[in-house]
Image (tube, rainbow, N blue to C red):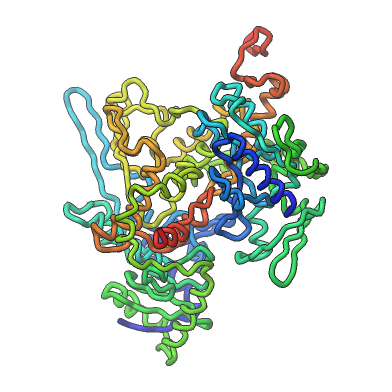
Amino acid sequence: MVLKLLSKERLLPFIERLMQKFLLVAPVREGNLTFYQPVKTAAEVAVDAPRSVVPPKEWFFPQTEEIYRYATGSGNLSLAGKVTAPPAVLFGVRPCDLRSFDVLDAVFLHEPADRYWAARRENTLLIGVSCNTACPECFCTAYGISPVKGTGADIHLTDIGTAYLAEALTPEGEEIVLSSPEFYEEKVAGIEEVLGAKEKALTEEFAVQVEIGDIPAKMARLFDHPYWEELSRRCLGCGICTYVCPTCHCFDITDENRGNAGWRLRCWDACLFRDYTLHTSGHNPRHALHQRLRNRFFHKLKYNQDRYGIEGCVGCGRCVALCPVNIDIREIIATIRRL
Amino acid sequence: MKEITEFLRREAARLLSEGVELFIGYGAGTRPVSARPLFATKLEEVAELVFNPFCVHNLVKYLLRHADRKVAVVVKGCDRPAVDRLVAERHLDRGRITLVGIPCGGMLARERLLAELGPRLHIEAVEDRGSSFTLRFPGGEHTLEKKKYLMEKCLGCTRNNPAGVDVVIGKEVLPVADPEHDPFKEIREIEALPALERAAFWEKFFGRCLRCYACREVCPACSCTECAFEQAVPGWQQGATWVSKAKSLPDNYHYHLIRAFHVAGRCTGCAECERVCPVGIPLMLINRKLAAETTALFGEAMDDPCGALCAYSVADPDEFE
């Protein structure tokens, strides 16, 4: 691991240098919302932007992706499939979202591996950034994530006041940092204390200190509990929680056809949607909303851990902030522990 | 507002002990300055009911899930018309519903509150002072002028005392509308834009749409048991649907414009669609515009509970003649 200091005035030149070689995907502000998008100029990058609505997993797993397209005519079939994975830098990823890539790797790289996910992970340099402020809904530390640690990134930046601490955490990250030594100064002493104090201050900003305990085991007894039906009474059955969640990964494959040509798409899907488990026979194993809502929380809080050995939630707080009817996973966790 | 909450709890307890099986109201939320829908079936649960300027949700649509039971539901003035719509369209039996009307002093715009007062408010009490709300927190209070902090829909509200209800909680309140507020100002500004700029305005918003369908799920006018966007059309074997599942600008436009037309003439202006949207699409600009168009073409829809576009009359305007 290589530790350097990047002064604040050098951040923009650092980003511009990256843009000479890579497509840069970074947080940008649109009104009072943050989105991760490819940028044309370094000035568009909002390094300290508040939490994005759509998590950066979208870069690796786009909401809509063409798998192949086909055309038929005079007895011929042409088929064109592609995997889009340009060399890119995904910049400004928070520690919660960095963890989400590990959660999704467990799903997508499980044999047989998803070529689309794998190619983009392979071709993307990850630059994480520590949080400067925490949203009240955040609770990443409940899952052993630190808001100031860049686990999973190639390079991780932390604002320590006068400069950024730049940690190169992988060989790819080191190569980038060491290839431009003029950007950096050597780190000064006392970094550990600064990071510790920053982490403590951020954690204190969480409105609720969530304790996970042994949620998967507790949930094993609660599948038939009436709690899920009561919770589902206010649930709208929309897809907000799913589509803003950094670890959700369900998708639908659809074919669209225009006469002699067509294409196959992969699109995000939500387990809360009515037709998510609808069979062509008309049977729907999760026909009732409370069955679908229960499934969401069992997957997030139990099944993911059981199947992949990694917790399905990263405590980013997006679903808590955006659910129109205040279905709050922090409250659900506390309730499960009590029941 | 404390007295209103106490009156509400007493009435809820009375209704539950007099044959109502489910009381739908509001309870405290887990986030600052927020409430959430609350479903009480037992007497002890009424103690959690609240009413305050964070009770923004339209609860009427939940009646569709309980159409076979005797249900009481709290309605503000903006929620009330949705009941008539659903009864007229034969989704609900008015005889099984007890409407608990609450005269409303306006609902606070949460985003503006948080931007002004910070994200970590702990409000202990709220007083309605007529032209302002006073929020009391440990160590002090904030007074917020309604003109600046109410939701947009409240600034044009002429119906904050719900009529035709079975129970009224509290006394009638003064109108909250701001006479200087023009709900069509932004619509006119957009209409005045050259076509390319107007397109850019909508592309920016529709490009963001996540197709989460929260707008549809929350909307009382969207009451179809199978939505057009879930239907496979004939030829489904070739993968035909009315709208692609793809998140693309054309498909997002398609979804929103079709939904706006399905809702036109039936929208009751509760503005829930805009409130729930996670990416801030200004849906009420479209719905308000279409409401004005249907009124101009067909007259006030209020007289006809079926709605302007659900009934045919030989006298309807016909531009082809």
Residue B229 drawn at (x, y percent): 43, 31
User: A252 above or below A220?
Assistant: above
- Can see residue A168? yes
Q: Which residue lies furthest to the bottom in this view?
A: A189
Pick the front one: A242 or A30: A242
Residue B185 drawn at (x, y percent): 73, 40
Residue B35 drawn at (x, y percent): 60, 52
- Can see residue A95? no
Residue B37 drawn at (x, y percent): 57, 46
Quarter of the image with the C terminus of chain B is top right
Q: Residue at x 58, y 40 (%)?
A: B23
Q: In this view, does B49 lie to the left or right of B2?
A: left
Pick the front one: A123 or B42: B42
User: A128 above or below B16?
Assistant: below
Pick the front one: B19 or B178: B19
- Asked which quadrant contains residue B226, the reply is top left
Q: How many labels does the image show?
A: 0
Pick the front one: B48 or A239: B48
- Asked which quadrant contains residue A87, the reply is bottom left
Q: Residue at x 29, y 39 (%)?
A: A253
Q: In this view, does A78 lie to the left or right of A216?
A: left
